[in-house]
Every structure is written in structure tokens, then in C-alpha cells.
Amino acid sequence: MDWQGQKLVEQLMQILLVISGVVAVVVGYATESFRTMMLIYAGGVVLATMITVPNWPFYNNHHLKWLDPSEAEKHPKPQVLAVAASKKKSSKK
């Protein structure tokens, strides 16, 4: 799953849970049944899980281009500065 796919999954999950929550409250209030409300919301959670948890192909539309290992050796990793490390330690105080 790529970064845009993760963003899409997060948005879909939030939208599905809010919609199922609203529908569950409205139906539960109309039927005066707490059990019905909880069952509808649980169904919405299961639906949101089935849509968002598996790595569906449409979540992989923006592929990342990784560096070739030989190309990565030409560009060394950036070194951590001692100043940045000391700032992190001092901010915890």
C-alpha cells in the first residue's frame, strides 16, 4: 500500500464509521431498540474493516520508485549532528 492509498484508507474508514454510527443512532431511536442500534453499528465496523484492512489493488496506484542498491552506495547516508542530538536530550527536561 502506498502513501496515497493509506490516506484513502483512513478517509474511507472515518467516513464509513461516521455514516454507520449516524444510521445506527437514527434507526435505534426510531425503533427504540438499543440492540438494533448496536447491531447496525457492528455491521458498519465489519464493513469498514473488510474495505480498509485488506491490501486491495486500488490502494496501490501511486508506486514509489526505490533506489537501486548500487545507486544507494554512491550516496552515503546523512550523518546525525551532535547539536541535534543534544537538543533532543535537553528538550526532555
Image (tube, rainbow, N blue to C red):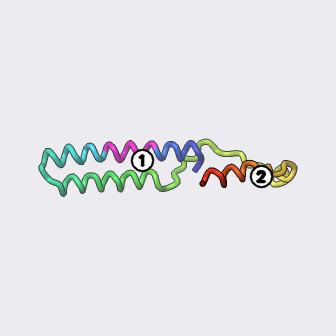
Where residue 54 sits: x, y (%)? 49, 56
Q: Which of 56 and 14 lies nearest the eye of the viewer?
A: 14
Q: Secondary structure at mark 1?
A: helix
Where residue 37 sits: x, y (%)? 21, 52
Q: Which residue is mark 1?
A: 13
- The residue sitting at 62% across, 42% down in the picture is 62
Q: Which mark is residue 71?
A: none
Where residue 59 sits: x, y (%)? 54, 46
Where residue 15 sits: x, y (%)? 38, 42
Q: Which residue is mark 2?
A: 82
Q: Is residue 63 left or right of residue 25?
A: right
Q: Is residue 18 magenta?
A: yes
Residue 64: name its quadrant: top right
The stretch in magenta equals 11-19
Q: CA distance from mark 1 to mark 2?
A: 42 Å
The outermost residue toward the front is: 93
Q: Amino acid at mark 1?
A: Met
Indicate which label's residue lies in the foreground, 1 or 2. Answer: 2
Residue 63: name its quadrant: top right
The earlier-in-sequence mark between 1 and 2 is 1
